[in-house]
Image: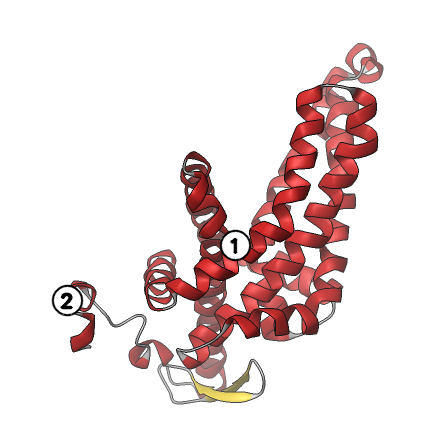
Amino acid sequence: MLGRTLKMAFWVSYDHLGKLLIASFIWALLVGPWILIFLTALIAADPAMILVIGLPAWAIGLGIAAPLGMVGMAHMVKEFIDTKDGSIRTMFQGMRLYGKRAIAIGLVYVVAIICLITNVWFYGYSDVFAERAPWVGLLISIVAVWILVYLGLMAMFIMPALVQKRDGWFATLKLTALLVLDNPLLALGLGIQLITITIVCLLIPPVLVFLHGGLMAVITGCAYEVLSRKYAAVEGHTETGKAGSRHMETVGRGAEKPMDLDADDDYLNRGFRDFLFPWKG
């Protein structure tokens, strides 16, 4: 599934690069100032400045700005996949439709991350457990770290799930938790890809500003699309008793789609020739 995800993401990005550049820049404008404020407070190394200025900036960036921009791009990527077309206007439409729920999820993440990092520090490094029960403190600290990792893997699917299913924030979190639990290898592979891309973008600031956000949205959106087709095919096989049937399922905005979409998907059926001679496609 990871290979199909990356192939679809490549061709979606190839076809809509100009729109993704604009969308990424808008996302950078939303998130960038808060990151700069947070980093400035950290570099100053003043505890009061970090507490009063740095942490609130981090919370606003992670809990409000980032999810708002990402849910807009997720909605735009969904349109790219569904219609092979789209516009920047769709990004703002996604912010309007799903912004409140995306921010609710972002704020849940902020609270969860603060609580878990506090637990890691308290149980792993504070003198209370270091002297009385060091192994217990270390175990609790390790569990908290793994929960943080799991939340990170969930985050990759949250915004695509929100715009596809249009559920509330709690149902979306529950769905993405189950998706990661059922597809650990895909989630891990996807996480490694996103971390690698992020590192490369950090080394090239213009790419970070103009492409990073869009690439994240495209890759995670394509991953969710691949997963949705997988579960649709499983459901079709269960209901009809025939693999590869033309069972129809209601997806997205209520439009009906066949199970074997991969065979007709233009993004998944291109090769190197299409890259060299796109006008011949």
The numbered dot on residue 7 is: none
Q: Residues within 10 Å of mark 2 (few under 14, many from 20)?
A: few
Lateral position of residue 80 relative to residue 151, left or right: left
The one nearer the camera, 131 or 281, is 281
Q: Which residue is mark 2?
A: 273
Q: Residues within 10 Å of mark 1 (few under 14, many from 20)?
A: many
Instruction: Identify the residue at image location x=43%, y=74%.
Output: 81
Q: Where, by quadrant of the figure, is residue 101 drawn?
A: bottom right
In the rendered image, the vertical position of residue 83 relative to residue 115, given as above or below: below
Q: Residue at x 38, y 85 (%)?
A: 242
266 lies above or below 257: above
C-alpha distance separating marks 1 and 2: 31 Å
Q: Is residue 120 left or right of residue 75?
A: right
- Front residue of 8/142: it is 8
Q: Can you see residue 257?
A: yes
Q: Amino acid at mark 1?
A: Phe
Question: Number of labelled discs?
Answer: 2
Label 1: which secondary element: helix
Q: Quadrant of the N terminus?
A: bottom left
Residue drawn at x 57%, y 50% as measured from the top left: 28
Quadrant showing the C terminus: bottom left
Q: At which x and y percent is residue 197? A: 42, 44
In the rendered structure, which amino acid carries the disc numbered 2? Arg
Query: Dots 1 and 2: beta carbons under 8 Å?
Result: no
Please tell me which residue lies in front, 189 or 270. 270
Residue 25: image tag: 1
Secondary-structure class at tag 2: helix
Q: Earlier in the sequence, mark 1 or mark 2?
A: 1
2 sits left or right of 45 in the view: left
- Whole-percent x and y of residue 53? 79, 33
